[in-house]
Amino acid sequence: MSQLAGIDTAIWYLDSKNQPLHISALVKVAPYPKGDLDGQSILEHLRLAASSSAMLHLTVVDSPIPLSMPYWSKVGELDFDQHLFIYDLRSLGGSSQIRSMIGEILAEPLRRDIPPWEIHVFDLGDEVQILSKIHHALLDGAGGLSLLFSFMDQEGSETLSLQSFNGRNKDTTSESGSKPNLLRALLDLPQEAVARLESASAFQDTLSQLVAAVAGGKEGSLPEVLNFGAPKLPFSGALRSTRDAYAFSVETSRLRKVARYSQATLNDVVLAVTSLALERYLESVYAYEIVSSPVVLMPISTRRGGNISAHNQVAGQLVALPYGRESLSETILAVKEEAGRAKRLHSRFGPKMLESFASSIASPLLSPFMRVVGEARVFDRLDPVFNLIVSNVSGTTDELYLEGNLVESVVPFGPLAEGAPLNITFLSYLDLTHFGVTSCPDLVKDPDLLGEMFCEVLGNFHDEYLGKSD
């Protein structure tokens, strides 16, 4: 039995009714090549895979010492009626109902008294769609997709297998149903206290260095973002307990061609397209003209090799999006410059900053605090730290199968944050890049238009470079 790392603890307690912190993915399975697709058999396949996963047997139990970090505990046998759900939609309108159902499922926080994950299977007859939902304290986005991919029928994949995932998490499991007793918690307390003090000291030192870098105008500083005052956009505000999920796809080759000829990364291209699409979307839907750079939070993986000190190994970089540029080329050049500054700043301060801050504040007191913040709708009155989240999750170009049938698409959906009711998460699978747009519909109007404008802007970018030889 082991205690949660600081960042996992912070995520666990920051979870609330209006800010449920789970990661999700929607998988579409086609009746090809077998042609005998059956939702119930897929459910049984998932049941077997889940029963073999050490990660999915983990639950969080509180420490007997008040304000101390909680522990990972292993559940011996899973009650799959509480984790696996199937919906027969063959005679109920099919896929037209799935979007609203997904929104309702994503809006509901995961139970905290059982291993915090769910899988929902939608049987449409001519296809099956699977929505996975796992608490962010258990896994970050990369880990969640690796676990999901390990459930599928594919050999020679670079993703983690069930066996490697079980071995990787061996140290965090314990005897079935065990809970930390007072003696164990007392023995762990000195180590926890030292870790908290070290984290607080590291956070203070890192923050001081960061402030000095900005004040001194050193290379890599990003003053516009570091004022922690992103502009208040028309959709900015406190989260409500509603969610909408929208997906769209683009050809990966289009993204890569633009990246190649603009000498940018795929992330830079996505940010540039998002910047222009967001500007058009705000003008069209809200009649709002941007007068200050919107700020994007981009989660960054800090996982290295076999490091298993935390289930989450992520940091985040803040990128100020350009606006009002006259041409597409100017926009991508501006994004490259801002993203470069953010990357340099992140390389110096990012990993230490988030990890040390999370370890410093991680406490059960966060839960009642978040309830108060949500009920009082504090972010309706405050400027947000960032306006939206844009995240890139590693996909695969290899074909995946489930029960012998082809996986057509994998669409990721990320969580929202107070003040930032829009999340765009993307991954590449086969020859397409799939974008999952999660939003709070009480704040964000017509998110479908944002996706349409994204595709239109990308098409313009692509046409701009179309005449250039490969």
Image: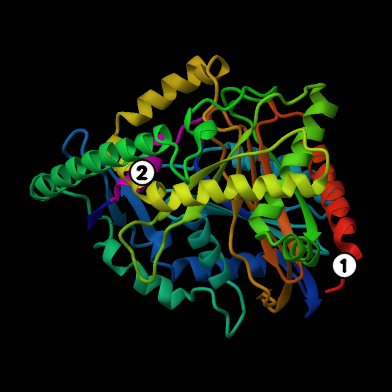
Q: Quadrant of residue 392?
A: bottom right
Q: Residue furthest bottom?
A: 156
Comes first in the chain, label 1 or label 2: 2
Q: Quadrant of residue 254?
A: bottom right
Residue 77: give x, y in percent of width and height: 38, 62
- Start and end of the magenta stretch? 4-19
Q: Nearer the viewer, residue 345 or 286?
A: 345
Residue 13: give x, y in percent of width and height: 37, 37
Q: Which residue is mark 2?
A: 353
Residue 453: give x, y in percent of width and height: 83, 42
Looking at the rendered structure, the secondary structure element under dot 1 is loop
User: Which quadrant is the C terminus positioned in?
Assistant: bottom right
- Amino acid type at image mark 1: Lys
- Amino acid type at image mark 2: Met
Residue 98 visible? The answer is no
Q: Nearer the viewer, residue 300 or 420?
A: 300
Location of residue 282 with respect to 58 vertically, above or below? above
Location of residue 384 with respect to 429 vertically, above or below? above
User: Is 125 one of the magenta-colored residues?
Assistant: no
